[in-house]
């Protein structure tokens, strides 16, 4: 490996770093990984991720800047916001993700991707809604399987992390990783990069550099970030929930249609 390394990160709030606050702002797993790589390499880090991004937002607002960075390594982790929105379109989602993977791989980047865990277990919800979220997540993961089969790279299966659902790995909203969760993700990708042939010490799991957390911080986080995020999802999912509840007779079969 050369001593100069370009890393581009594309995605949503997890890649922005929500849940891992510092005095400078959100940090998160991608920045932790970049900082660890920077101990060995002359690193150029470009994080194009934005809060609330869907796959289409990544294609339209992030991909060009990421490709222009000419990355050696590119993390592409998105899809949860697509799963949580009423306008679910698996064909568009596949086209978006394959477009991103093709453009980044065509630039010569090593892809870092992830398979997602079942987010429905983190929040209580009606059974039919939970099953819909699970089906969408399965469809999303099938697309990521296709991306990995077509373009290779390194990936992390979040659903296979044994202690994934422990409270300490999650921020107050149970949707974004805590500092420890971000560190666990950064270290997992770091270990995969080392196995691939990179030479550096993966990020530590020991908390450092982040703001302290407790019930007061959790309350402030929920008021400032968690509740507004859930409010946006509720406004988006609300019409879909009503249509689903109205269209499904009591005890009848479930069938999801594209909103």
Image (tube, rainbow, N blue to C red):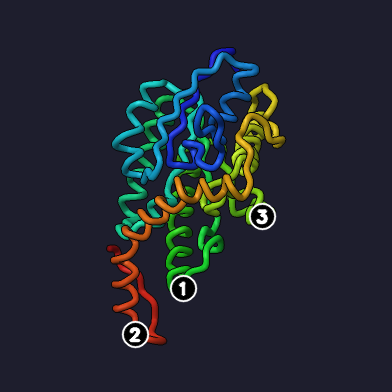
Name the outermost residue toward the right.
Answer: 206
Q: Tell whether 124 sits left or right of 50.
A: right
- Quadrant position of residue 154: top right
At 67% from the left and 31% from the top, the residue drawn is: 208
Residue 249: mark: 2
The quadrant in which the N terminus is found is top right
Residue 166: mark: 3
At 55% from the left and 36% from the top, the residue drawn is: 21
* Picture coordinates of residue 94, whole percent (x, y): 36, 49
Q: Earlier in the sequence, mark 2 or mark 1?
A: 1
* Picture coordinates of residue 118, whole percent (x, y): 53, 59
Rounded to the nearest angstrom, the CA distance separating label 2 from label 1 is 15 Å
Question: Which of labels 2 and 1 is toward the front?
Answer: 1
Q: Earlier in the sequence, mark 2 or mark 3?
A: 3
Name the outermost residue toward the front.
Answer: 216
Q: Secondary structure at mark 3?
A: loop
At 64% from the left and 54% from the top, the residue drawn is: 167
Q: Is residue 112 above or below residue 177?
A: above
């Amino acid at each position: 490996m050369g001593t100069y390394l370009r890393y581009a990160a594309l995605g949503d709030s997890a890649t922005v770093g929500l849940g891992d606050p510092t005095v400078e702002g959100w940090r998160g797993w991608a920045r932790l990984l970049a900082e660890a790589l920077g101990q060995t390499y002359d690193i150029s880090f470009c994080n194009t991720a934005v809060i609330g991004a869907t796959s289409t937002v990544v294609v339209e607002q992030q991909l060009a800047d990421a490709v222009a960075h000419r990355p050696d390594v590119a993390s592409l982790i998105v899809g949860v916001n697509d799963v949580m929105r009423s306008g679910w379109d698996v064909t568009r989602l596949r086209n978006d993700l394959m477009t991103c993977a093709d453009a980044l791989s065509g630039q010569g980047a090593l892809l870092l991707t992830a398979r997602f865990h079942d987010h429905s277990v983190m929040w209580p919800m009606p059974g039919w809604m939970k099953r819909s979220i699970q089906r969408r997540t399965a469809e999303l993961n099938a697309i990521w399987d296709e991306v990995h089969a077509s373009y290779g790279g390194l990936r992390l299966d979040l659903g296979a992390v044994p202690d994934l659902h422990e409270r300490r790995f999650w921020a107050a909203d149970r949707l974004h990783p805590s500092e420890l969760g971000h560190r666990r993700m950064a270290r997992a990708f770091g270990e995969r990069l080392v196995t691939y042939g990179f030479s550096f010490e993966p990020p530590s799991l020991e908390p450092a550099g982040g703001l302290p957390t407790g019930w007061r911080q959790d309350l402030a986080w929920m008021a400032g970030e968690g509740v507004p995020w859930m409010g946006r999802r509720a406004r988006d999912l609300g019409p879909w929930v009503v249509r689903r509840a109205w269209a499904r007779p009591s005890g009848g079969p479930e069938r999801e249609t594209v909103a």
